[in-house]
Image (cartoon, helix red, strand yellow):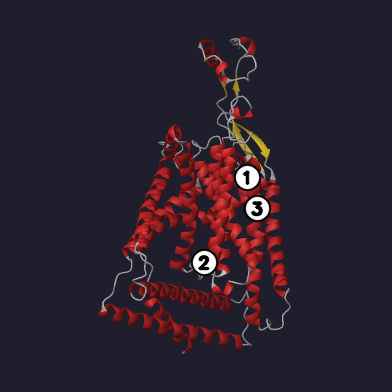
């Protein structure tokens, strides 16, 4: 029978996640999207719910203990009774549905209007034209990834689980015990006698085959696709999660160090002049970018294609210039907001915000430090030096089990937040892709969809990493039997997990990020960048 307390916790957690997802969409959405894009909003809201539920399902699995052998009927005292295998199966299928169907369709649907405006076809367009555009592009996505999923499952769905053969004596040669039945009572392990000398003798005559054998099994589609999604997500999580684990504590502490302070007349005048100059520079840059685009659009005789080297080089330079411009605009907006908090909004600014950032920054630093130590001491060594966090969780279970489960939730969910932070920090510093920050009342639905897809891609790697890192504590979980047995020895993909390729990459990238942020802790001011950008655009125009 299912534990009523676990059922209540599950329902409450789902309600909280739904409320938080609804709050994020309502409070962070841009005013332009207030009465539009209802379908993308639902996809975003329940996408955040799904990502949070995926990570929080691990601590629920820990509390459920359904992997314990006694849960089959003879010792159910610690068993929660929830069908965690069904819960995980649902998650395995919902994540690819969201990533490869709902989010792409919503993105194409949301941006179809912009494309028709740019093409000059939005006026007089039929209401269902956006849906047709979205479906047309989505069919291409489904075909491509459908083929990838089908071919990989066809050729790589086999797992080779190592086993060791142990031969023992027949039962007739062992000791015999008599169990006295208790009237009108179920069987209990307390009726078994303690292990005696005769049992030890039987164990000593066992013969152990030193050579490991293997059992080859085909995994079911849901488990295989969970492994495939985890493998794909690991490339993002190893990069962005590592950057976020270093950047998140630093940025929170810097938010306290650089908190708004009252300006005198001289400081006010200097800051105002500097901001005005940067605004003028960026306006000039924006006009130059627009003129350059107009000139290229009018050049009909120039061949531009995928196989034209000059065209590809020009397109890459154009993309880089646009990303630099967006970065400069974002940093200018940040500085303008700080300037407003130091002047016009100084009296209304809540002084508890920077103090809260400092406290959260210290807590984030401690969690990141514990993760690094746990990776070094437990995850990476073939024979762990110490169980470390596993011992801490088990110690909590001795006097208040809820704290151990909550600690697993905190440490796991922290990794997901770090991945989101790392993506933003990486995009802002290195300009490989467009930055999608989440800001109150300034977040477009395209940024919502991008961040939702990112956290969903990183959710399964976070669960897999946490289940492996806490496998001593989470030894009775359903997910541990999947990721530490079936997926660990899966053909091709298992090599990465057995050799801990991603874990080494995560640790190395984090250490490199710490060194880099130690040299450049703050995001660059856009003043110098905008000047260089303006001069480069002017030189191209002659």
Task: Identify the residue position indicated by label 2 in the image.
Answer: 28
For disc 1, the neighbor class at 10 Å (few under 14, some 14 to 19, many from 20) is: many
Q: Which of marks 3 and 1 is nearer the N terminus?
A: 1
* Number of the label disc, if any, that sits on residue 321: none
In the rendered image, the vertical position of residue 208 relative to residue 319, given as above or below: above
Task: Identify the residue position indicated by label 3 in the image.
Answer: 94
Q: Nearer the viewer, residue 328 or 398?
A: 398
Residue at coordinates 66% horizontally, 36% vertically from top-left?
216
Q: What element carries label 1?
A: helix
Q: Would you say the residues marked 3 and 1 are in contact, meaning their CB atoms lie under 8 Å apart?
A: no
Q: What element carries label 2?
A: helix
| Eye-nearest disc, 2 or 3 | 2
| Eye-nearest disc, 1 or 2 | 2
Q: Distance between the residues labelled 2 and 3?
A: 25 Å
* Number of the label disc, if any, that sits on residue 88: 1
Q: In this view, does 468 lie to the left or right of 135?
A: left
Answer whether residue 232 is visible to the viewer in this image: no
């Amino acid at each position: 029978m299912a534990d009523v307390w676990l059922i209540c916790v599950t329902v409450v957690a789902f309600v909280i996640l739904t409320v938080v997802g609804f709050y994020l969409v309502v409070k962070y959405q841009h005013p332009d999207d207030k009465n539009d894009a209802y379908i993308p909003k639902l996809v975003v809201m329940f996408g955040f719910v799904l990502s949070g539920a995926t990570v929080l399902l691990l601590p629920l699995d820990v509390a459920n203990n359904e992997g314990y052998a006694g849960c089959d009927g003879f010792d159910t005292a610690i068993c929660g009774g929830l069908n965690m295998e069904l819960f995980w199966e649902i998650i395995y299928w919902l994540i690819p549905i969201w990533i490869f169907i709902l989010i792409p369709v919503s993105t194409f649907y949301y941006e179809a209007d912009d494309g028709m405006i740019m093409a000059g076809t939005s006026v007089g367009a039929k209401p269902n034209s956006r849906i047709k555009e979205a479906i047309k592009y989505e069919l291409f996505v489904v075909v491509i990834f459908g083929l990838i999923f089908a071919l990989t499952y066809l050729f790589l769905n086999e797992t080779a689980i190592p086993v060791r053969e142990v031969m023992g004596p027949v039962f007739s040669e062992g000791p015999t015990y008599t169990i006295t039945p208790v009237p009108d009572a179920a069987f209990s392990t307390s009726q078994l006698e303690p292990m005696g000398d005769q049992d030890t003798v039987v164990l000593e005559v066992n013969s152990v085959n030193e050579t490991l054998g293997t059992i080859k099994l085909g995994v079911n589609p849901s488990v295989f696709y969970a492994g495939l999604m985890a493998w794909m997500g690991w490339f993002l999580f190893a990069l962005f999660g590592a950057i976020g684990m270093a950047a998140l504590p630093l940025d929170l502490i810097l938010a306290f160090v650089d908190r708004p302070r009252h300006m005198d007349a001289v400081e006010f005048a200097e800051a105002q002049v500097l901001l005005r100059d940067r605004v003028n520079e960026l306006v000039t840059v924006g006009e130059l970018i627009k003129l350059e685009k107009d000139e290229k659009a009018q050049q009909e005789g120039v061949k531009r294609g995928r196989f034209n080297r000059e065209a590809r080089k020009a397109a890459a330079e154009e993309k880089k210039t646009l990303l630099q411009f967006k970065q400069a605009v974002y940093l200018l907006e940040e500085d303008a907001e700080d300037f407003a908090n130091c002047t016009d909004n100084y009296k209304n600014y809540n002084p508890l915000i920077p103090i809260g950032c400092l406290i959260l920054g210290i807590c984030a630093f401690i969690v990141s430090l514990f993760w690094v130590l746990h990776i070094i001491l437990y995850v990476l060594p073939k024979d762990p030096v110490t169980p470390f966090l596993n011992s801490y969780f088990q110690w909590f279970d001795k006097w208040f089990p809820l704290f151990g489960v909550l600690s697993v939730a905190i440490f796991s969910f922290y990794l997901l937040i770090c991945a989101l932070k790392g993506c933003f920090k990486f995009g802002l510093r290195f300009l490989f892709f467009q930055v999608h920050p989440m800001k109150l009342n300034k977040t477009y639905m395209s940024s919502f969809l991008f961040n939702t897809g990112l956290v969903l891609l990183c959710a399964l790697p976070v669960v897999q990493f946490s289940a492996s890192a806490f496998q001593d504590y989470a030894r009775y979980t359903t997910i541990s039997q999947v990721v530490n047995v079936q997926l660990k020895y899966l053909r091709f993909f298992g090599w990465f997990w057995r050799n801990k390729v991603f874990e080494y990459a995560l640790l190395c990238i984090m250490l490199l990020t710490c060194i880099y942020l130690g040299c450049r802790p703050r995001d660059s001011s856009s003043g110098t960048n905008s000047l260089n950008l303006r001069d480069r655009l002017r030189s191209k125009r002659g």
